[in-house]
Amino acid sequence: MQLFYELLFPVLWIAFFVYWGVRSASVKATERLEPASSRITRLLLLLCAIALLALPRVPLAFLNQRFLPSGELAFWTGAAITLAGLLFCVAARRHLGANWSQAVTVKKDHELITSGPYALVRHPIYSGLLLGLLGTAVAVAEWRGLVAVALGFIALWGKLKLEEKWMREHFGSSYEEYSRRVAALVPHIL
């Protein structure tokens, strides 16, 4: 049973990334791509977040202290939140179809998608990823998990801001109206 507890989160995240990689092959051609420096910065922040969640301990002792009691409740609550977040990402990715890209881009024949998960939030993939990170942090139950969520938020917020700018430029008043109606990451809040 201990092996199950040790492997559940790695299996969830690895399955998610494998799915993501397989689905990334069927996208539209790119017309405009964000600078490499932006992509590298985001990747480094996300790798730091992953390391904080994946390593058994980190060198800064205070980050290894608990913000929640460890145990079954934190583990299963975290697992449910992580799974919900990753499934929300998958649903959004499937709904976005060939318009998806890993980096901030404008695609050839880019479409503004406002239905499905995109009717709840403008960036449901980012919302789902942050929820997945939060769930994993709850299961880890140590301060390093919350730092990982903060790093993930910083990385995705920077991407979101650039994407918002480009979508406003590309779609004009349609995107303005959409952004007034639908929150960016958390329905009715943010």
Image (cartoon, helix red, strand yellow):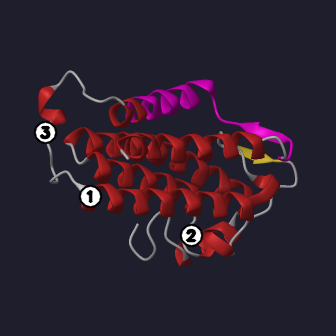
Residue 132 lies left or right of residue 168; in this view the side is left
Q: How many badges with numbers are in the image?
A: 3
Residue 98 x/y as whole percent:
82, 53
Tag 3 secondary structure: loop
Please give the name of the residue rendered at 21% of the width and 43% of the height, measured from the top-left corner: 142
Vertical comparison of 10 with 186: above or below: above
Residue type at mark 1 is Glu
The residue that label 2 is drawn on is 179
Q: Quadrant of residue 103?
A: top right
- The residue nearer to you, when weighing 118 against 15, is 15
- The residue nearer to you, when weighing 44 against 8, is 8
Residue 95 x/y as whole percent:
73, 65
Tell which circle, 1 or 2, labels the residue nearer the N-terminal end: 1
Question: Which residues are the magenta region?
Answer: 27-49
Q: Does the magenta stretch include residue 168?
A: no
- The residue nearer to you, when weighing 102 against 59, is 59
Q: Does the magenta stretch include residue 28?
A: yes
Dot 3 alpha-carbon crowd within 10 angstroms: few under 14, some 14 to 19, many 20 or more: few
Residue 149 lies left or right of residue 11; in this view the side is left
Please give the name of the residue rendered at 46% of the width and 74% of the height, measured from the top-left corner: 187
Can residue 29 be seen at all in this image of the molecule? yes
Nearest to viewer (mark 1 / mark 3): 1
